[in-house]
Amino acid sequence: MMRMHYTRDNMAGLLRSHDINPTHQRIEIAHALFSRQEHLSADQVMAIVNTRHSETSKATVYNTLKLFLEKGLVREVIVDPSKVFFDPNTSPHHHLYEVDTGKLSDIDAEQVQISGLPLLPAGMVTEGIDLIVRVRRKA
Amino acid sequence: MMRMHYTRDNMAGLLRSHDINPTHQRIEIAHALFSRQEHLSADQVMAIVNTRHSETSKATVYNTLKLFLEKGLVREVIVDPSKVFFDPNTSPHHHLYEVDTGKLSDIDAEQVQISGLPLLPAGMVTEGIDLIVRVRRKA
DNA sequence: TCCGGATATTAGACAAAGTCCAGATTGCCG
DNA sequence: CGGCAATCTGGACTTTGTCTAATATCCGGA
């Protein structure tokens, strides 16, 4: 994949290409996620976006993340019962979750094969397959 | 596997065999989970256990479910960002989650093969591998 | 039987994540 | 400039889950 610079200007283009009106707040939130290339929770996004002085409200952060999700700009990762993580990497991949530290990292889907899954019930379509490897530091 | 009757008496034995002191409340909670053989959230357990008249407090329901978890009597299933489900089936298996209805069902692990997972970081041990197939009713 | 300690249960206060709403702002187009 | 649609905001609210201090229950020994 092309090397990419996650400038705010490029964020505007990214948003437009996903049919999202690039407002100031949306650009900041996208920048927070994409410049880090990390899994962030809504709270973490809040904190990052409001480091210097309060700029973006909680409601906007939640609204925006939900919008990004609908438009396919980010993915939702559900591994922790207490909070949702948002993942700027939308290419097919799985996750490694360190239970004790909360650290979450990607596993490329290319190298992993999953076979023998049963047929879906009639009229159902797969929305996604989430594979989560939960690990812990050895005692 | 042996056909099993999930009477309250058998629950007491099940609890003892898992090193859990079988109190009245614990038996009721175990009975709720095992007689149904379904995935229940803490709220649902609360509701079931207190149908006729209030018998078991919220704190006890949460304490007990956590205890069952530690003792390996049930498994935790994290698929919904808003609540945790408890699964009385502890044999290796995966899950099929119907996103729009919230319905959760089991996929036997026997028939599914997963290969090509990367080596774990040094000093880490796998705690579990969760495979979740998210499906949706076709539009 | 009665006592005492350990274990279990309880109500209710609290915390954290997320939702909702009505009003204020912004940006755009004629 | 005026007006409309889209966006943003603070803050109240809901839900899930945790914590705590007080009470209840259980059980073994004198």
Image (cartoon, coloured by chain):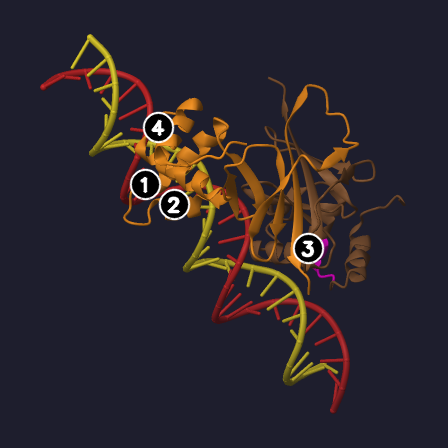
Chain colours: A orange, B brown, C yellow, D red
The residue tagged with tag 2: helix, strand or loop?
helix
Residue A101 image position (x, y, % from top left)? 56, 57
Name the subunit of mark 1: A
Check disc 1 and report the residue beneath it. Answer: A56
| Residue sitting at x 32%, y 41% | A56
Compute the Cα span from label 1 to label 3. 40 Å
Q: Inspect the image, locate mark 2, and give the three-letter code of the amino acid beneath it.
A: Met
Report the mark closest to the observer, 1 or 3: 1
Q: Which mark is residue B33?
A: none
Outermost right residue: B2
Quadrant holding the C terminus of chain A: bottom right
Report the mark closest to the observer, 2 or 3: 2
| Residue sitting at x 33%, y 49% | A51
Residue B33 image position (x, y, % from top left)? 71, 46
Check disc 4 and report the residue beneath it. Answer: A22
Check disc 2 and report the residue beneath it. Answer: A46
Name the subunit of mark 4: A
Report the mark closest to the observer, 4 or 3: 4
Q: Inspect the image, locate mark 4, and give the three-letter code of the amino acid beneath it.
A: Pro
Which numbered disc, 1 or 2, marks the residue that appears first in the sequence? 2
Q: Badge 4, how many Cα within 10 Å: few under 14, some, many 20+?
A: some
